[in-house]
Amino acid sequence: MNIPIADLRKNYTQGGLTETQANLNPFDQFRHWFQEAVSAEILEPNAMTLATINEGGKPSARIVLLKNLDDRGFTFFTNYDSHKGKNIEKNPWVSLVFWWGKLERQVRVEGKVEKITSEESDQYFYSRPIGSQLGAWASNQSQVIPNREVLEIKLEEITQKYQKQIIPRPEHWGGYRVLPYLIEFWQGRENRLHDRLCYTLKEDQQWIRERLAP
């Protein structure tokens, strides 16, 4: 049965987010929510939408995986020569969105990207499965290729090349850290009167928390 898209709706009833419940530090609040997402066995709780803007002002978005979090920001890894990498090179301002539907929660992040150190990238690269290390060499991410066979041939070549040695991290592959100036926590509520607590980083490096109308 075909259901009109406009008729698809859900009333959110999981709970609320009040100022007394929320941590004053947005990173601590994120850690708390993230752990609850893990405990709820949400598929890929570290999956996040990364939105970038190219030099012409056109946006694009894709899902990437959060791989580290500290009080500086949110870290993910990719090919620096990819579409997203080239966008970041021209415009370092990005946005992240986490959606944990089972908990009726969303976290939105706005910030500026920086490359992490080579040492940090090396540490994560060598923690990856061998297949993923080889894949970083085999794929010229975002480049047009004629067919999948090209990838498979390249992977076989790289596998043979590094069969009996440590696989070096490609110079074109590594991590980015998103340094946020804004983190918003959204909790679905009944009648679309959702809870939104927004943390904004001020010039004195202090976080200010404010409630936004849904």
Image (cartoon, helix red, strand yellow):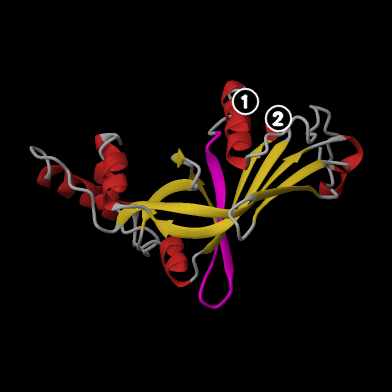
Magenta segment, which residues? 45-60
Is 142 displayed left or right of 173 in the figure? right
Residue at 89% over, 35% down: 190
Q: Secondary structure at mark 1?
A: helix
Is 95 displayed left or right of 209 in the figure? left
Residue 94 at what x, y percent from top left? 55, 60
Query: On the image, which quarter does residue 188 sit in?
Result: top right
Q: Is residue 3 above or below residue 202?
A: above
Q: Secondary structure at mark 2?
A: helix
Residue 54 at what x, y percent from top left? 52, 71
Residue flagged by tag 2: what amino acid is it?
Leu
Residue farthest right in this picture: 191
Query: On the image, which quarter does residue 145 sit in?
Result: bottom left
Is 77 in front, or is 210?
A: 210
Q: Which residue is mark 2?
A: 103
Residue at 67% over, 38% down: 24
Query: Which disc is residue 36 wearing?
Result: 1
**Are the two marked residues, 1 and 2, in contact with CB atoms closer than 8 angstroms?**
yes
Real-space Cα distance between discs 1 and 2?
9 Å
Choose the circle earlier in sequence order: 1 or 2: 1
Q: Is residue 166 above or below residue 56?
A: above
Residue 209 at what x, y percent from top left? 73, 47
Residue 51, visible in the rendered structure: no
Residue 18 at what x, y percent from top left? 80, 34
Which quarter of the image is occupied by the N terminus? top right
Q: Is residue 106 above or below residue 53?
A: above
Residue at 84% over, 35% down: 189
